[in-house]
Amino acid sequence: MDHLKIAATDRSPDVDFDFEAGVFSLKGESYPEDASTVFGPIFAALDRFFSSADIRELRFDFDLIYFNSSSAKALMNMFQMMENAAGRGTKVVVNWHYAADDETMKEFGEDFSEDLENVTFNLVPSSSAA
Amino acid sequence: MTKGVGVSAMLARDYREFKSILDTRGVIFSFSGYLSEGILYSLGDALRHKMALEDTDLTTVKKVFSVFIEQAQNIIRYSAEKVQGNLGKAIELSSGMVTIGTDGDKFFIVCANTMLNEDVPKLKARLEQLAGMDKDAIKAYYKEQLREPPEENSRGATIGLIEIARRASEPIQFDFDPVGDKQQFFCLKVSI
């Protein structure tokens, strides 16, 4: 599948999905008026990718500063897609990056990880404050 | 013919009084009128800079910003006072008011907009439900709603209000005031 690259805007994250390498990254902020404009293309690409046969190991890096509640719902959707793939035998690792003094982002990481049994979810604090 | 420049005796006093009302209420900024996503971004950006300059801790900055965004997006989505049109691209502007200020060591965010009578009971029920919940119950409810498919016609209202209640450090306050016989002025105040 083609590399999915979407540049960040003021209110949407940088998307960099390298399907070939199995490395995915979502970086920045997400508070568009309509979350489906940001996450629609992401879901479509992931759907196609997960339905293809030979997936071994995947890594997702989330480095988000802020997202609104409708983006949170979309992220939850993404994690459920990953969990389903992991349940079918794909090794999925999520690295949830957040500034060490940002309790909100840490708590979001903890909330999302609670629902995941087959995905390896790492909370990765970084020392530099935003 | 009108003159280009004129001196109006009451102009400065008038607006100074207007501003001093805002100042005495601790208002950092207040926006009233048609809100767009672009205005929301710019106000949010100014808010973050203002708080960063005052060394507000990061978690508080994130909470205030989050409540501001959810409230402003609720106005954009739900205000009964809207103009729509097409100026090369589709444009929708919703009218409302967003006010952010400080009261002692707390930040407050107030949003207000008019809404249709028929939409009031549902919103009121949601807010009363949230107002009756403690922090743990709100968190559990948030997580439950994260997993739910979106409600029809809701455009994400439920989870947005729970997010607001979750970030508040005091119970959220809300009120409705009738405007004519078809609309109500809705007001929501959140302290952080």
Image: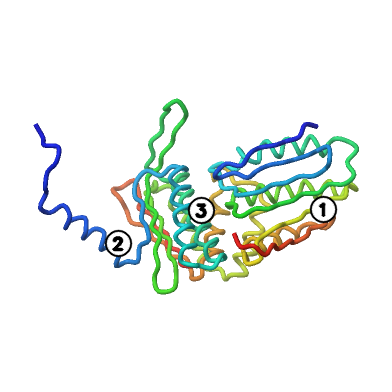
Residue at 71% x, 47% y: name it. Answer: A77
Q: Position of residue B36 (x, y in %)?
A: 43, 42
Q: Are marks 2 and 1 in contact (CB under 8 Å)?
A: no
Q: Position of residue B119 (x, y in %)?
A: 44, 48
Task: Work out how far the residue at label 1 is from the one at label 3, CA to CA, in angstroms.
Answer: 31 Å
- State the residue position of label 1: A93
How many tags in the picture?
A: 3
Name the amino acid type tagged 3.
Glu
Q: Which mark is residue B22?
A: 2
Specify the farthest residue to the top. Answer: B88
Residue at 43% x, 65% y: name it. Answer: B108
Secondary structure beneath dot 1 equals strand
For residue A36, above or below residue B113: above
For residue B5, above or below residue B27: above
- Mark 3 or mark 2: name the one nearer the start of the chain: 2
The residue marked by circle 3 belongs to what chain?
B
- In the figure, residue B59 lies in which quadrant? bottom right
Name the amino acid type tagged 2.
Leu
Secondary structure beneath dot 2 equals helix
Name the amino acid type tagged 1.
Val
Mark 3 and mark 2 on one chain: yes
Depth order, front residue of B189/B46: B46
Secondary structure beneath dot 3 equals helix
